[in-house]
């Protein structure tokens, strides 16, 4: 067999190419996690609607639950485990505390490559007078 | 033999006991010790009914008042004004969005037309809107249940589910529904920041001010009508609206279709 060299070289090249993503990630610096800015109002409140870990992982499910409950069950008040009440509204509640949508929601969504279509209808700057 | 049966019964008994306590243990574990689980409820001021209805006293309305009422509704709900001045007459008639609008008697009451109508009624402006029917044909037509009838009688749209198929528009005998053929935002002169707009590709219509009833306010049109419109529970014999219906002769639109419209007109 005279092709031994070629075959081995081929296998090595295949191996390098196949494992390229792992190499690449090892040597190239990772995109840093986005830095989230809390507004003065949010800082004063200290806590979100639910605890931070829950919000981080589940805010989309929470919003889903909110919209179904508001629109389909006609219930608009959310009472969390601590007994604090919130008006279940995307623009009027979430964006009341997180009124810096660009530095909060958007920054994280850009990082995670998500574009919620909610803002086609929901007002994304409820504080601004237009 | 004796021994093993005894053993078997013992084990079976303990297992049954264990299964019986599982829900109790679960309940204790779930309560987690701090406060109650999150829950949702209606606001304290929310207005409720079995079937919301509306009486419009057309004798108290003129062109100017009608315009004022339409403006109150449309500015509250960010209804775009796609006018002929901006897009031309042809496009405007196709793209127009309306929740409540003005029409003539002969358009509103197509099945109640005397040969010779009184001049006064002929010229009177009639306000028309979604009738929040008892048997809404739009609800039956909707393939996604985006349009549904609430327990309080309001025929409501869940915009999150609307796929823009327009079956509801074909089903509605009152023309109460409009389709967003274009992005409505550029046509909203002054946005109400507390209420969402709609987007290209969804149908929309009057919601009987579900968002205002939830905080104890009457519909915007009723508030702006200065007494020409009365809103209330049709199924409550002691309500103001039933009182008005007892005292006046009223008509409804296209009753023969069996939709059971909840909007009444004093002529």
Image: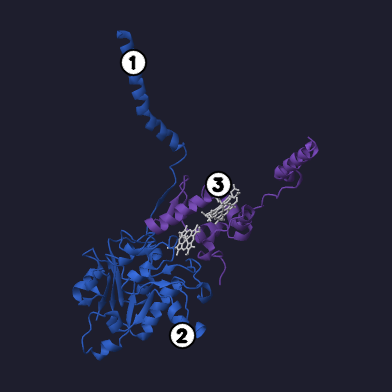
Chain colours: A purple, B blue
Marked residue chain, label 3: A
Callout 3: SS: helix
Callout 1: SS: helix
Q: What's the CA distance linking mark 1 and mark 2?
A: 88 Å
Find residue B8 and name its label. Answer: 1
In depth, the one of A36 and A17 nearer the eye is A17
Marked residue chain, label 2: B
Q: Are marks 3 and 2 on the same chain?
A: no
Residue B116: x and y in percent read: 21, 90
Residue B134: x and y in percent read: 27, 65
Q: Residue at point 53% right, 61% down?
A: A117
- Does residue B112 appear in this view? yes
The nearer-to-camera label among 3 and 2 is 2
In depth, the one of B4 and B252 nearer the eye is B4
The quarter of the displayed image where residue B264 is located = bottom left
- Does residue B207 appear in this view? no
Callout 2: SS: helix
The quarter of the displayed image where residue A103 is located = bottom right
In depth, the one of A129 and B84 nearer the eye is B84
Neighbours of disc 3 within 10 Å: few (<14), some (14-19), many (20+)? few
Q: What's the CA distance linking mark 3 and mark 2?
A: 50 Å
Q: Which residue is mark 3?
A: A57
Q: Does residue B171 sit above or below B40 in this rendering?
A: below
Between discs 1 and 2, the one toward the N terminus: 1
Neighbours of disc 1 within 10 Å: few (<14), some (14-19), many (20+)? few
Marked residue chain, label 1: B
Q: Dots 1 and 2: beta carbons under 8 Å?
A: no
Find residue B89 and name its label. Answer: 2
Q: Dots 3 and 1: beta carbons under 8 Å?
A: no
């Amino acid at each position: 067999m005279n092709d031994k060299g070629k075959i081995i070289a081929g296998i090595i090249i295949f191996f390098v190419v196949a494992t390229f993503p792992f190499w690449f990630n090892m040597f190239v610096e990772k995109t840093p996690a986005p830095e989230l800015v809390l507004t003065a109002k949010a800082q004063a409140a200290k806590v979100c609607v639910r605890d931070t870990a829950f919000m981080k992982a589940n805010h989309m499910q929470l919003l889903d639950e909110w919209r179904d409950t508001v629109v389909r069950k006609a219930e608009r008040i959310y009472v969390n485990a601590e007994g604090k009440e919130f008006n279940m509204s995307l623009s009027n509640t979430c964006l009341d505390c997180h009124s810096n949508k660009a530095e909060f929601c958007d920054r994280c969504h850009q990082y995670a490559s998500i574009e919620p279509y909610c803002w086609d209808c929901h007002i994304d700057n409820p504080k601004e007078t237009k | 033999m004796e021994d093993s049966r005894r053993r078997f019964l013992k084990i079976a008994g303990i297992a049954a006991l264990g299964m019986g306590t599982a829900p109790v243990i679960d309940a204790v574990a779930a309560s987690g010790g701090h406060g109650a689980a999150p829950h949702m409820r209606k606001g304290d001021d929310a207005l409720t009914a079995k079937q919301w209805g509306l009486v419009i006293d057309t004798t108290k309305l003129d062109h100017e008042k009608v315009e004022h009422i339409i403006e109150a509704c449309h500015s509250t709900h960010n209804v775009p004004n796609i006018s002929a001045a901006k897009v031309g007459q042809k496009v405007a008639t196709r793209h127009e969005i309306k929740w409540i609008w003005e029409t003539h008697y002969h358009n509103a009451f197509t099945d109640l037309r005397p040969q010779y109508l009184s001049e006064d009624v002929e010229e009177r402006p009639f306000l028309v809107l979604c009738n929040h029917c008892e048997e809404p044909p739009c609800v039956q037509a909707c393939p996604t249940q985006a349009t549904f009838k609430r327990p309080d009688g309001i025929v409501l749209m869940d915009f999150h589910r609307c796929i823009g198929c327009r079956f509801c528009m074909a089903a509605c005998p009152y023309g109460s529904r409009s389709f967003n053929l274009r992005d409505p935002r550029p046509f909203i002169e002054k946005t109400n920041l507390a209420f969402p707009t709609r987007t290209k590709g969804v149908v929309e219509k009057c919601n009987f001010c579900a968002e205002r009833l939830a905080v104890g306010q009457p519909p915007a049109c009723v508030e702006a009508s200065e007494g020409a419109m009365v809103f209330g529970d049709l199924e409550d014999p002691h309500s103001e609206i039933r009182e008005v219906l007892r005292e006046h002769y009223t008509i409804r639109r296209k009753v023969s279709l069996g939709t059971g419209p909840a909007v009444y007109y004093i002529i």
